[in-house]
Amino acid sequence: MKQTDEKTSRIGPFVTLVFLFFIVGFLTTANAQFQGPLKAAFLEGVGNLKNTFATLITFSWFLAYPLCGGVGSSWINRYGYKGTLVRSLFVMIAGLGLFFLSSWFTVRFPGTNLQMGSNVVPWGFFIFLLGSFTVGASATIMQVVINPYLTACYVRGTQPVQRLAIGGSANSIGTTIAPYFVTGIVFGGLAMEEIQVSQLMIPFASLALVMVLVVGILSRLSMPDIAETKAAAGEKLEKSVWSFRHLTLGVIAIFFYVGVEVCIGANINLYAIELGYLNPALMATLYWGGMLIGRLVGSSLSTVPPRVQLIITTVCATTLTLLAIGVNNPWLLTAVGLFHSIMWGAIFTLSVAKLGKYTSVASGVFMIGVVGGAILPLLQGVIADFSGGWRWSWWMVIAGELFMLYYALIGSKVRQSAE
């Protein structure tokens, strides 16, 4: 996209990226929802550490973000935005293949287990973890493209935070559908004790074929690069991207945001199962559904600054989580999704404000913070195991909300500009 036509409305690329945002959300949540079923199917021989091992599924996915965000930035500079997206989809296909392999291997070689002290874990479980990391790597690279492109890709009548909210709405549709894809389609509505690992093969093979089709379509679409969001060929940036304080604190804010978002989205079902609630997948669906509603509302907030949006949503999310702990009721946590919905767009917009040609590099750096989605849910699982339950582990969510409130009030102020 050249400087002379940067104000041309780019509906085609915008719609393409919104669809890919849907794919990222769907697979992220589907991966997390495998914690409960695979805890039953794979981790029968893992003593009192079932919650810890189960949360490794989410940990493996989000571990890819700090390790692969820089890959996305370097690919953008080398192959452009479209070339990077195509390559990321090939990585996704490979990861879905590993999911298929984990099921096939466990069915074909049922006695191949790893003895870890008194714990017995099938090797197929570790293949699944590798698949989680690989698909997470694909999602990381895709988001390194999607976030700055939606921010800078002009669409008439919108502002950047709105375009991210629209993309986030598509993401939320994927996250809302995913829990019932796992429980209803992959496992056919079976009770946990009836789940079979063999049921993984056909759904993941089908998803891989869908991604092959998406690659074929994307390779034929026009997706011009964006002016002034990346360094020119051979150009060296004068400053470290970490020298921009509002970006550095934004990375920390996104660490806590993704961490607390995934803590609720991935672990609320385990909390509900512990308390004996029926149909725990419904709670996850309502949580992600609240994210969808919030993002749809956020996409219409053309006059509310992202800083104000972040202040209001963090205060409301903190209040609801405190109430959930006080009455020991996971249903209150489902409502937090409504307020988590627009935090990503608000934090990203504030973090890359006035970064100019540093934007694409900043987007890769920004992905480092997403590792919060790996660390905090895993830490929460450990706390749940050692404290005897999930109730008090939700204080981690409150700590994360309070840091984001600090970022909205103080940390997001631009003290150094690249423009």
Image (tube, rainbow, N blue to C red):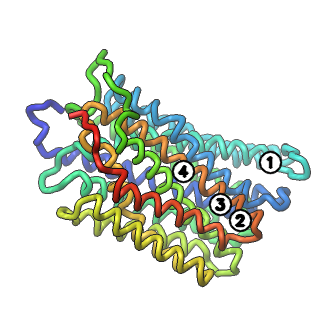
The picture quadrant where one finds residue 70 is top left
Q: Please state the horizontal and vertical placement of residue 304, each as a whole percent of the image.
A: 22, 64
Q: Please state the horizontal and vertical placement of residue 283, each as a whole percent of the image.
A: 54, 74
Task: Estimate how packed mark 3 is, as few (under 14), some (14 to 19) or many (20 or more) residues with alpha carbons within 10 Å.
Answer: many
Task: Between label 1 and label 2, give the one nearer the viewer.
Answer: 2
The residue wearing badge 3 is 380
**Left or right: 342 as drawn, with respect to 393:** left
What secondary structure is found at the residue carrying circle 3? helix
Q: Residue flagged by tag 4: what amino acid is it?
A: Gly
What secondary structure is found at the residue carrying circle 4? helix
Q: Residue 384 carries which label?
A: 2
Give the CA separation, mark 3 to mark 2. 6 Å
Q: Which of marks 1 and 2 is nearer the N terminus?
A: 1
Figure check: 124 above or below 76: below
Q: Which of marks 3 and 1 is nearer the N terminus?
A: 1
The residue wearing badge 4 is 372
Give the CA separation, mark 2 to mark 4. 18 Å
Q: Which of marks 3 and 4 is nearer the N terminus?
A: 4
Q: Which residue lies furthest to the left in this view?
A: 4
The picture quadrant where one finds residue 247 is top left
Q: Residue flagged by tag 3: what amino acid is it?
A: Gln
Q: Residue furthest top?
A: 234
From the viewer's side, name the closer residue of 12 and 58: 58
Answer whether residue 164 is visible to the viewer in this image: yes
The residue wearing badge 1 is 122
- The residue depicted at 39 percent of the width and 31 percent of the height is 73
